[in-house]
Image: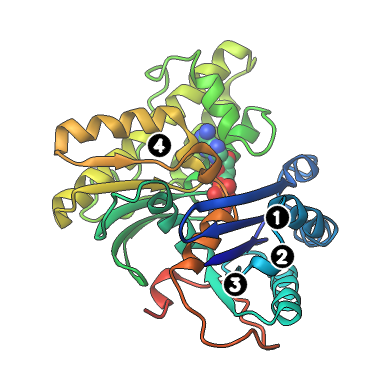
Amino acid sequence: MKTLGIETSCDETAVAIYDSNDGIIGESIHSQMKMHAEYGGVVPELASRDHCLKIVDVLEDALGNHSIDSIDQIAYTSGPGLLGALLIGESFAQGLSTALNIPLIPINHLEGHLMSPMMEFPEIKMPFICLLVSGGHSMIVDVIEKGNYKIIGQSQDDAVGEAFDKVAKLLDLPYPGGPHIEKLALEGDPNSYDFPRPMIHSDNLDMSLSGLKTSVLYTVQKIKNLDHNKKVDIAASFQQAVTDLLVAKITRAIEETNRKEVIIAGGVAANKFIRSEFKKLEGLLGIKVYYPDLKYCGDNASMIAFVGSMMHAEKKGNNSSQVRARWPLDELKK
Ligand code: KG4
Ligand code: ZN
């Protein structure tokens, strides 16, 4: 069975095909990153317009030699995300579903991130712990079974990716800042600035990033000449503080739940320093740590097609909108 996945929740227009026998057999993605970089963040209306412009080309590219008639069902991201952007993906998916007379399945974007490592590593078995860290989300989820997700910890304020982006802005780095901070940090000393690790010792799995970002802001404001040497040290110290916080919270999550597998998903999971620090937990805690392939860390349609392939829609798509800008994981139906 072939499931076509469509992702347009933010600034990536993506289409992929998941075959239940052969896995991903086609995928294409158009990133709007360069367009938004000029504005220092995603501009929702521009995002919607660009999805409209690119989605047909992206579909054709993902299909390659496969005929559109070979698709058995369509899965699309219906939330959470930018409302206008989501509506473009939904309308497109509804049109295809009606024209091809095949089922339509709305998918939660976060569930896509949570499940995507299972697409690459079939040996992963639920239950497991997932640390989902992206530009909009920072949460620790106990993935009990398909559709049953318990958020056991989350950021009280900024998302981890958002903190990377804001600190990058303070250092005059382009948007999105995560990869630029990571690159600068390679040259810096992570012990040069003692930034706070807010809530690291709190009696729960929640965390806070906003205080850390503000501390970087005050540090930068005090520096008269923010040259390259200072920037690399700030980047390395900030990245170290974030990593310490995440490692401490995941360690605690493992101790509390006794789960044996940890998956790190979302855009920030691309960070190689964070990856290497988490890998050390394997020996320390007797667990296995998995990361998605770099191309599946950020937003993509393969994860949406994959989750869709696990679901079976009974009926064809109808014309009512399932789009939800806000759609918490614990409100998913099993
Ligand atoms: O999952 P994603 O592509 O989009 C959503 O937010 O849903 O995540 C994007 C976020 C951005 O904040 C970006 O700065 C961050 O992930 N990011 C990174 C790295 N690559 C992307 N943060 C730290 N290190 C990276 N290498
Ligand atoms: Zn995402």
In three-dimensional space, the C-alpha distance between marks 1 and 4, rounded to whole angstroms, equals 40 Å
Tell whether circle 3 marks a residue whose Cβ is less than 8 angstroms from ligand 2.
no
Let me know if residue 202 appears in the view. yes
Determine whether 82 is above or below 263 in the image: below
Residue 72 — which label?
A: 3
Q: For mark 1, what is the residue? A: 63
Residue 23 — which label?
A: none
Q: How many residues crowd around disc 1 within 10 Å: few (fewer than 14), some, or many (20 or more)?
A: many
Residue 68 — which label?
A: 2
Ranked by sequence position, the earlier of labels 4 and 3 is 3
Ranked by sequence position, the earlier of labels 3 and 1 is 1
In three-dimensional space, the C-alpha distance between marks 2 and 3, rounded to whole angstroms, equals 9 Å
Amino acid tagged 1: Leu
Q: Nearer the viewer, residue 97 or 262?
A: 97
Amino acid tagged 4: Val
Q: For mark 4, what is the residue? A: 242
In three-dimensional space, the C-alpha distance between marks 3 and 1, rounded to whole angstroms, equals 13 Å
* Quadrant in the picture for residue 91: bottom right
Ranked by sequence position, the earlier of labels 1 and 2 is 1
Ranked by sequence position, the earlier of labels 2 and 4 is 2
Q: Secondary structure at mark 3?
A: loop
Q: Are marks 2 and 3 in contact (CB under 8 Å)?
A: no
Amino acid tagged 3: Asp
Image location of residue 256, percent across then percent down: 15, 55
